[in-house]
Image (cartoon, grey):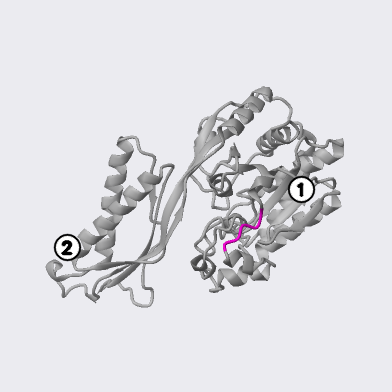
Amino acid sequence: MIAASPLAALLPRAQELFDRLAGLGYDGVGITRDAYGKGETAALEYLAGVATESGLVTSRDAAGNLMIDLPDYRSGPAIWVGSHLDSVPRGGNYDGAAGIIAGLLCLMQLRSEGITPPQPARVIALRGEESAWYGKAYIGSSALLGKLDEQDLDSRRRDDGTRLADGLAAVGADLGRIRAGEPLIDVKNVAAYLELHIEQGPVLVARNLPTAVVTGIRGNIRHGTITCLGEAGHSGAVPRWLRRDAVFAVAELIARLDEHWRVLLERGLDLVVTTGIIATAPEEHAISRIPGKVDFSFEVRSQSHDTLEAFYHLMQTEAATIGRNRGVSFEFDRRIYSAPARMDEGLVRRLLSISAQHNLPTETVPSGAGHDAAVFANAGIPSAMIFVRNANGSHNPHESMELEDFIAGAGLLYDMLRTPL
């Protein structure tokens, strides 16, 4: 039987916060909190107001992220608890926001009980974690750690073409320091980074686990747009041997990559491969037209850097071979790389120990999805994550996290904050 969470009394408050965020972000289909846009800013301002009303102290860092502290926040190495506020277009209400609300509830409970934690505790609501808006993931955390370059800042927003640099400037970020690659925080003052997040896959639901502790986060290599260029023609007049059909070329490439993926999985490698966007030009495509141009995306994820690089090289080799055989060419936009990350083994052990004390599962899982925790971990900051069970996947309007599971996971964070590292 699961022990009562130390935050059990705050379950109605959690429901209120999630309901209010859902109302602010609802787009008629799902939840849209656009990075560095109105949706994300509305959520940030709402949570900042809640924090202030609860007697907590809020501020904005030099990247535009929201910081929430106890009134007696002390300088020195602190435990940061956070996640991201933005969502994908027409996404769900819990992706990202659950981690911020969990941290906020922890600070509210510490204050109400008059507890001064052994080390300073801070909640950070990060902006721009999702790559859906600017093609770049982890923007808010990367800016904090001096990891955005000029190409990142020149990235364009998917819907209106706004440059990321302008989006950052609009929320008060210090573009001069960010552009110079200057870290906006002293990593020595971050003792640990903790993140609660919904699981975005089906493992916890399938295994009937309300919570689990994350061991590592997959990295990825991505291209937002790869263009296959062939030659348009009449579908009835050009025989196969004279065709330069871009669709068949792309289809062959994807099929070959799928077969390589299957073989590598049989060898025990950690790997997932996705083409999430594929399209002929809408102003030209027709049933009777051989397509001369196809745009598609590419993403490979793994917990191993070597596996990522090997599969990426394989993809390029296959594209070159298909290009020669079919008389087409492949043009690649900017390659985007996010490094895999391992969670801190000591923090993982502590979370498992606290889970046992709460009669929660002492189970570990890897994360297939990316999270800001990877950026902090790869900057040398000890990091750890808690997954909360969530039905129906994520990046869709049907995310379904039970509030009892959420409160149980938030209780693990709370005990991490009130005991010495």
Specify whether residue 252 is in view.
no
Q: Residue 133, image x and y in percent?
A: 54, 63
Left or right of residue 14: residue 299: left
Q: Is residue 355 left or right of residue 200?
A: right
**In contact (CB < 8 Å): disc 1 and disc 2:** no
Of 247 and 237, which appears nearest the observer?
A: 247
Q: Mark 1 vs mark 2: which is more N-terminal?
A: 1
Q: Amino acid at mark 1?
A: Glu
Q: Is residue 109 magenta?
A: no
Q: CA distance from mark 1 to mark 2?
A: 59 Å
- Which quadrant: the C terminus? top right
Quadrant in the picture for residue 58? bottom right
Q: Is residue 333 visible?
A: yes
Residue 43 occupies quadrant:
bottom right
Q: Secondary structure at mark 1?
A: helix
Q: Residue at x 64, y 48 (%)?
A: 187
Question: Could you tell me which residue is drawn at 61 percent across and 33 percent down?
Answer: 347
Dominant secondary structure (helix, strand or loop) of the stretch shown in magenta: loop
**Above or below 336: residue 153:** below
Q: Is 256 above or below relative to 347?
A: below
State the image coordinates of residue 78 (x, y, percent, origin top left): 71, 43
| Residue tagged 2 | 325
Q: Amino acid at mark 2?
A: Asn
Q: Return the residue at label 1.
A: 16
Query: Which of pointers 1 and 2 indicates the residue nearer the eye?
Result: 2
Q: Please provide the residue range marked out in magenta.
A: 181-185
Number of residue marks: 2
Q: Residues within 10 Å of mark 1 (few under 14, many from 20)?
A: few
- What x and y, as percent, mark residue 155? 51, 68
Q: Secondary structure at mark 2?
A: helix
Q: Viewed as shown, does residue 391 lie left or right of 257?
A: right
| Residue closer to the observer: 160 or 176 | 176
